[in-house]
Image: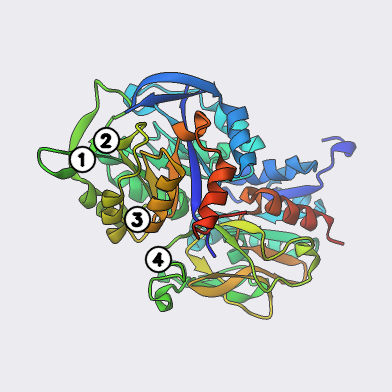
Amino acid sequence: MSQEQAYQALIIDTGCANINSLKFAIERLGYVVGVSRDEAKIKQAPRVFLPGVGSAEFAMQGINELELKQLITSLTQPVLGICLGMQLLTRQSFENGVQTDCLNLIDTEVNGIDISGVNDMQSNGSGLRLPHMGWNTLSNISDNPLFTGIGEDDYFYFVHSYCAPVSEHTLAQCQYGQSFSASIYQNNFYGVQFHPERSGISGARLLQNFMELV
Amino acid sequence: MLAKRIIPCLDVRDGMVVKGVKFRNHEIIGDIVPLAQQYAEQGADELVFYDITASADGRTLDRSWVERIAKVIDIPFCVAGGIKSEADAQKMLSMGADKISINSPALSDPSLINRLNRQFGQQCVVIGIDSYFDDETGQYQVYQFTGDESKSSKTRWQTIDWVQEVQSRGAGEIVLNVMNQDGVRQGYDIEQLSMVRDVANIPLIASGGAGTMAHFSEVFKQADVDGALAASVFHKGIIGIQDLKQYLREQQVPMRS
């Protein structure tokens, strides 16, 4: 790759299936983005994405087999984990009743979404089910630059059954049966539970904000 | 609050969008990518691309259009038709599809649902069900291979039993297509959808029968479905997506703005 084509962002190739949709979304913003599991390339990239679908247990297994754990934890540039990728940045996940040790970069944990307390009904008479799938809004959005220009009327696409609780690391909340973290961060590690690459204009704005973080 | 979803379905044959009535007599509507883009811009919450010949024909299809769509679309989309294995699913997902919808192959081999769930996660495993109301027996019956009239056949499954079966095997979402209503625009089958809603604790998408904006309001309010799928009313310009969402908002149905 020639110098003028140097990657502005790199997606860590964890072997999960949905990497292309994220790559295309970043490309639509005009950035040069690569997909790799090469240590040197990942270290050099100004921005790093950690995508993920599937279960935490299998994803961590993959990360451990590919010996990516030490690399990811050593990164100092802004890193954005998306959906399961966000969950992997936490201490641990209790998905499927299994305790999976995660990357321990954001000091929180992941549990099942609790819809039991809602009496199966939202205020409009609609029931709740899992996965939490579809477009939802955010609340308690912090003034972190990741959320510049994003308000409580903007919708984001979610699809998940597990979540991180609201904590000191929460950047924005979402409500579905319970309040949970729609976004978390600690140091240079950021995570979003929703899929910005599939969240229309609002999602594009968030990706742009991440690319422009100083 | 989680919004209810409006989902245009684009039936695809050889990279072109087509539409038939009651699964027959397909006419070409237009090119796939510009149509997909147009729906996304108009406010569709999700798109379904259904390769109507795939399951029945058994041939390997050129699916390069999936990647072309993924490049321009910034809302979720699902690919249906002819996905029979983990390898097929992997291919669709890696080209950029968010979900894959399985219908006939799941009926032939229900364990496919478990395997797809394990490999790709529940969130991308959608099960399409073609359900037919049999006047004589008064039963809702699941049909297979409905993409081809000559192969379309009744299965041993009653609809409710199959819904429970796919759910227990790890489906992430159900699209219930009521064959009696398909393409005739007489309204969704509220009675059947309500019946399925009672047993489905995963998202449920209504398909088949949308003709007016009131039909959408009814299906959300009376059957509490998570999304409503429709084709001809959108393709033929009978209902505009923006008008529909405005109308539903006025009817107190939560819609993404």
- What kind of residue is marked 4? Gly
Tell me where residue A188 appears, x and y as whole percent.
77, 67
The reply to whether residue B173 is in sight is no
The local secondary structure at tag 2 comes to helix
Q: Tell me the subunit letter for badge 1.
A: B
Residue at mark 2 to residue at mark 1: CA–CA distance: 7 Å
Is residue A21 toward the left or the right of residue B177 in the image? right
Numbered disc in front, either 2 or 4: 2
User: Mark 2 highlights which residue?
Assistant: B180
Residue at mark 4 to residue at mark 1: CA–CA distance: 26 Å
Q: Is residue A121 above or below residue B61?
A: below
Circles 4 and 3: CB atoms closer than 8 Å:
no
Tell me where residue B129 appears, x and y as whole percent.
31, 42
Q: Tell me the subunit letter for badge 3.
A: B
The front one of A198 and A154 is A154
Give whichever of discs 2 and 3 has the lower sequence position.
2
- What kind of residue is marked 3? Ala
Residue at mark 4 to residue at mark 3: CA–CA distance: 11 Å
Do the residues indicated by labels 2 and 4 lie within the same chain of the protein?
no
Do the residues indicated by labels 2 and 1 lie within the same chain of the protein?
yes
- What kind of residue is marked 2? Asn
